[in-house]
Amino acid sequence: MGSRSKKKNEPEALRIDGELTIFRAAELQPLLFADPAPTRIDLSGVTEFDTAGLQLLMVAHQTAHAAQRSLQLLAPSAAVCEVLELLNVTDFFGDALMPRASGALTARP
Amino acid sequence: MDLDQALQTFISESRELLEDMESALLAIEQTSEKDELINAIFRAAHTIKGSAGLFSLNHVVAFTHVVESVLDQVRDGSLTIDEPLVALLLSCRDHISALVAAVAAGQTEADTELTRKGEPLVTQLRAHLEAPATASPATEAALPGPAVAPAAGEYGCSATTDAWHLSLRFGADVLRNGMDPLSFVRYLGTLGRITGIETVTDSLPAADAMNPESCFLGFEIALRTDADKATIESVFEFVRDDCRLHILPPHSRVAEYIKLIEQHGEPQRLGEMLVHCGTLTASELAAALSAQKFAPLQPLGTLLVEQGSVRAEVVEAALVKQKQVKELGAQENRSIRVDADKLDQLINLVGELIIAGANVNLIARRAQIGELQESTSKLSMLVEEVRDSALQLRMVKIGATFGRFQRVVHDVSRELGKDIVLVIAGEDTELDKTVVEKIGDPLMHLVRNAMDHGFEPAELRTARGKPAQGTLRLNACHDSGSIVITVQDDGGGLPRERILAKAIERGLVEAGQHLSDSEVFALIFEPGFSTAEKVTNLSGRGVGLDVVKRNITALRGTVELSSEPGVGTKVTVRLPLTLAIIDGFLVGVGKSVFAIPLDMIEECVAYSAEPGHDYTNLRGEVLPFIRLRSLFSIEGSPARGENIVVLKHAEQKAGLVVDTLLGEFQTVIKPLGTMFNQVKCISGSTILGSGDVALILDVPALVRQAIHHVPAKRSEPVPA
């Protein structure tokens, strides 16, 4: 479930659990494109990921990039990584992708 | 979008397709017009593969793909379909069926055991694929080197790549239509190796303008595969209307790539993408782009034609396919799938309605209000019609059940080394769905048994002046409220003496007892009875026929057998048309009321009897009868003016002596409790309008009893 967990000292971290697919695209869009926009999206709990999900992330990324905002995609799950690699779009997101290893950021108290 | 529901549709459609595939495979050996059947088989495999791909059932796709490739070669004539190949394809069909069954059981991932079972099939299929493949143009094109002669001039140069190039732009509605471009990319991976892929993101809109359910992506893909253009194109069959697809074969002229680039109107970027994919080298691109300035723009049509002749065929095939899909759609609109449980519930409710209606009728009659009686009788008429149409809903044609046996006969005759052909008649005969479901297994036993024991070896057949090819006939027809299914062979007939000897040996009959032919033949339905000299794979273990009889009896049916030495054997199975509601006829004995299925009543006559005997003279015929009063030990003396109800079953007639005739009654059959399982001559119970219970008489049992006990001693009373 998409939930906006506002922890202290860590504003705007959007955690998406479960499907990030066409079935929930309409539901997740307002969360991803909210104003103020999230600066961090936690993808560690994404179990399913399809073209619709990918597009949402791409647009979010492009929008942030154009506005010179930072948008980090945190710890993409295996489902996400598989698609990114299959379609060879890892480069599209560039530095915005934060692999699991640097997930320590989220663990900050 | 309900994926579960879609998956269910996939499963049931796959089953239908597999059935089509099976019947086409079986028919193909016997016909010279193979083309259409081959297409049907190919279509089945192809559609299953395509749909499985949509559900990411990759293991199904992988297996079906190999089958499809072989079929493709059969279709284009590079592989001839012969008997071993048909057998192999049948096994493959079974494997796909097993895979689909596993999916239906909730197993969406590959199962190691099933995969292991599929491996030998794949190996055999591959063997077929490899033999003629050396000559196929696809491999030729895939060979590095001067397969395509370089044309003069830089513009006509061939690219060095040995991969196909696919340029894909998906339409906005693809996702909404339930298709995920990702699955197509994944699926392409099963055709060969994707050596390069670039995702085209140029159409991505701004955040506020984005419809999250539209698709904005495109792909440039380099694919290394042995598949031909039609195969690659067929991957996108389901989105053909919804995507722009360009396929360039390996070593296409650079000009073709340039046209592709032009078409998308984004030369520089797309060019780079082609380079990224590894389709073009940087120098090829540079040369091409400079040449492009001089190239005239060509209309799309010319471009398509120049892309190769394959395309024209494919377009045509696609059109035909689309038409078929449309026709199919029209058919589907005329029928809907309904849950069997819902139907059962409807039938139950109709049953209750009939009982309640009978009650109302009774009250109306008692009240003696003319108007009320009039409306109730109108109501009963409607209820009757509702009942008939409700029952009609459950009626299915027996053809599907019969069709299965084509395969059985095909397989078993190969196994036994006998040449046997199955002839089916009456496949349009309808009967209740539950009966159809339950009759399959007993019929299977009978068919297998007939094939194993019934047919004599070919030499003996020829010696007897019969055609070497044996004929097994399956026939179905309606006869007085029952359906009659016959399994008939033109084999050697039953060995009466051997059966008798065996029966005596087993202690089933006493030596010296005189038995009629039909009594002797009935012995083979006794438990543990088998006269087969050798135990084969199929039958001869002495289990089977007694189970057949038990199953058929459980359906309130009967089975009998007639046989003539050297001519053949015929097994006749009689089953009631429905298990739920029947038109009944009520008779009274003393205070008890009994219901008799109306279809089985010939006529009713006034009581008469040959003095001292339990039979009467019915227009010159001997009609044995049973006194219901003594059969069920009903107290009281026979009423004056007794009647005989003439029953008919399986071409035999018997009379039933009753006190009163009470008239027709719609009878909702309620099964008797297990406590009454042993009760003979009663097949169920029903509830009368008054709320009383009436027992339904088991006519076949009564007729048998009447015939067999004439003029023997009076049958023992049965508790009722």
Image (cartoon, coloured by chain):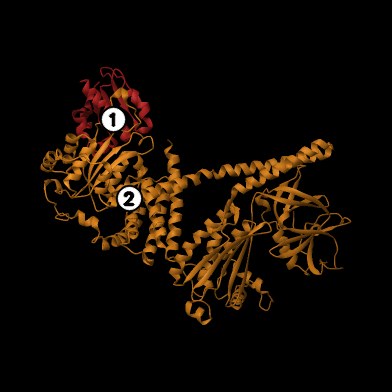
Chain colours: A red, B orange
Closer to us: B229 or B347:
B229
In the rendered image, residue B685, in percent from the top left (x then y), is placed at 71, 49
Q: Is residue B386 visible?
A: yes
Q: Where is residue A56, by image quadrant?
A: top left
- Residue at position x 64%, y 73% in the image: B520
Tag 2 secondary structure = helix
Q: Say above or below: B503 vs B103.
A: below
**Extreme-right residue of the structure:** B640
User: Do callouts 1 and 2 mark residues in contact (Cβ within 8 Å)?
Assistant: no
- Percent across and percent down for residue B77 are 32, 61
x and y percentages locating residue B605 in the rendered image = 82, 59
Quarter the N terminus of chain B occupies: top left
Q: Is residue B305 left or right of residue B389?
A: left
Q: Considering depth in this image, is B537 or B635 the residue closer to the camera?
A: B537
| Residue type (three-letter) at the residue carrying disc 1 | Leu
Vertically, is B650 above or below A31?
below
The residue beneath circle 1 is: A43
What residue sits 46% from the left and 51% below the top? B16
Return the residue nearer the eye: B271 or B178: B271
Task: Kindly identify which residue carries mark 2.
Answer: B314
Residue A24 in the image: above or below residue B469 = above
Report crowding for label 2: few under 14, some 14 to 19, many 20 or more residues within 10 A (C-alpha).
some
Which residue does the image show at 56% across and 43% down from the upper left? B341
Q: Chain of mark 1?
A: A
Q: Is residue B258 left or right of residue B352?
A: left
Tell me the CA gap for discs 1 and 2.
Answer: 42 Å
Q: Is residue B252 left or right of residue B51?
A: left
